[in-house]
Amino acid sequence: MIQSFQKFSQSRVAKVFLAIVALSFVVFFGGGRLFQHHDPNAIVAEVGDIPISRYQLSEKLQQQIQLYLAQSDGPLTREDLLKSGFAQTILNELIQEILLNLETENLGLTVSDETIRNYIQSIKGFHNERGEFDRHLFTQMLRANGMSEDNFISDVRKELIRGELVDAISVGAYLPDEMTDRLFEAQYQTRQASLMVISPKEMAAPAAPSNDALEAFYKDHQKDFETPELRTASVFVIDPAVIGKEIPVSEEEIKSFYAAKPDVYGNQKLDKATPVIIEDIQKEKAIEKTLKITQELDDKIAGGATYEELAPTIKGAQLIKLDGIDASGRDRMGTAFAGFPKNEDLSKEILQTTFTLEEGTDSPFAQGHNGVYYAVKLDKIRPAVIEPLADIKDRVLKIWSENEQVKAAYAKAEEYVNAFNQGDKKVSLMKLLPNLSLSEKSPDVPNEIKQLVFSLRPDHAGITKTQEGFAVVVLKKIIPAPSAIKDEKFTAFKEKLLKQYQNDLVMAYLNALRVRYPVKYNSKAIQTLISQ
């Protein structure tokens, strides 16, 4: 944690980081006391006899999300990070810190006051314009972030001691040259391969099965034929863009709008910019008008009016009937519902709303993607059921046929591979893949094919499943890494590999510490925290 001062003190996130460190003291030196043990979700994990409170994880999670987003210029959001398992990552970091703290105490490790003082004075975030440690700046920054000097020094001491232990674990790590050479060669060699894809769709449709065969297939795969929960609903959609086209715009409004936004329309004269100005004015008015309309409609619906009564009274309103669809937007036969709006994001929002309602209830109007407003009334819920064969015979027959075509495609691919590996090298219809290397991305080659290429011996074939079907791959040639590449990249590769090996040693040590200091997780508490 403290090491990050060195890295970020010159950046725009330095103040953010200082706030994070300040909050972390609240976490470690008192946050856990805010919860009482009668709350089953108060503790998210325990390391030995040390609890990690929900508050502790929440604070740390918020801090790290704030720091990450401050550093990142990408499109990731807070929600994206939470969905990616970021909370579990932060919890694991907390657990690792506690494990190392416990072990350093057990081993009696320590650092001198002089070492701590020198380390703090080396942090550039506490340096003045002359590049010197500034005691006044140090005190000022701690005070601004609600930190006491004693707590800060205590945290520095713990981190330096943890660093001593980690260094002791990894300092003797060594990789033999032979191993490094082989790994480098595997990483930077180039492989040439050929490919042929056999699609199940290209296989001839099988002859209709007997009733006994179809019934046996149904019984063997009965769970696959469970019809999921289906919902029937009405969706009321209002698009401000449609309403805006009917809104009149006066010449005075056009002139006033043009004068108020000279930079928006560049150097265009008023007459040339008028069509765009009218459109912009209509958009602004349409947003206000649509909001007012939806508020009035919500009141009328609450008073008993139906969608069917109200939709014809609104210009351009759309009434969509969802008749027995599942959470993925498909009907009982697995066919995608075609009546959704063309905008996929809006359709997903409508579908999500539909599956949050209780039967017989409706949602208020909400603004969805592209500013479109919608409301949903859930008419009926049909629970998930395993339907009898007689009711879904067409569906079972369709899946049986597709299954038979998949079998036929795999058998054909296997036949090609066996023939090639047994000496018949006359595999036709194969195309040459671009040269592949583990050191470079291959955007035009699926990962499963690339993995197969690097698992084959030269002049041998193999099979892998792809989205299109079964890929037959033949490895034609392995081209060793050029000596110039090795001269250029080998040193950095070896250093990176050693660092990874050292990290693996530390992780192995941490896993061993989990035996001495057992770690317990409260999964429900973690999920509750994330959902909140």
Image (cartoon, grey):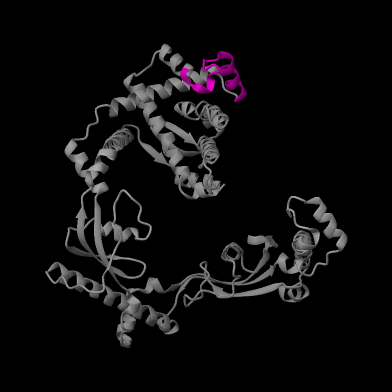
**Position in image of residue 486 (x %, y %):** 25, 41
Q: Is residue 368 visible?
A: no
Q: In this view, does 473 lie above or below 510?
A: below
Residue 226 versus residue 441: which sits nearer the camera?
441
Residue 176 versus residue 270: which sits nearer the camera?
270
Residue under the point 83% across and 67% down: 248
Highlighted magenta segment, given as a residue range: 122-145
Residue 356 versus residue 48: which sits nearer the camera?
356
Judged left or right of residue 77, residue 433 is left
Residue under the point 21% across and 35% down: 175
Q: Residue furthest top?
A: 114
Q: Quadrant of residue 378?
A: bottom right
Q: Quadrant of residue 287?
A: bottom right
Asked whether 207 falls inside the magenta stretch, the response is no
**Position in image of residue 19 (x %, y %):** 57, 29
**Position in image of residue 495 (x %, y %):** 29, 34
**Position in image of residue 324 (x %, y %):** 55, 75
Residue under the point 17% across and 63% down: 460
Residue 360 versus residue 469: which sits nearer the camera?
469
Q: Which residue lies furthest to the left in this view?
A: 423
Judged left or right of residue 151, residue 376 is right
Asked whether 123 falls inside the magenta stretch, the response is yes
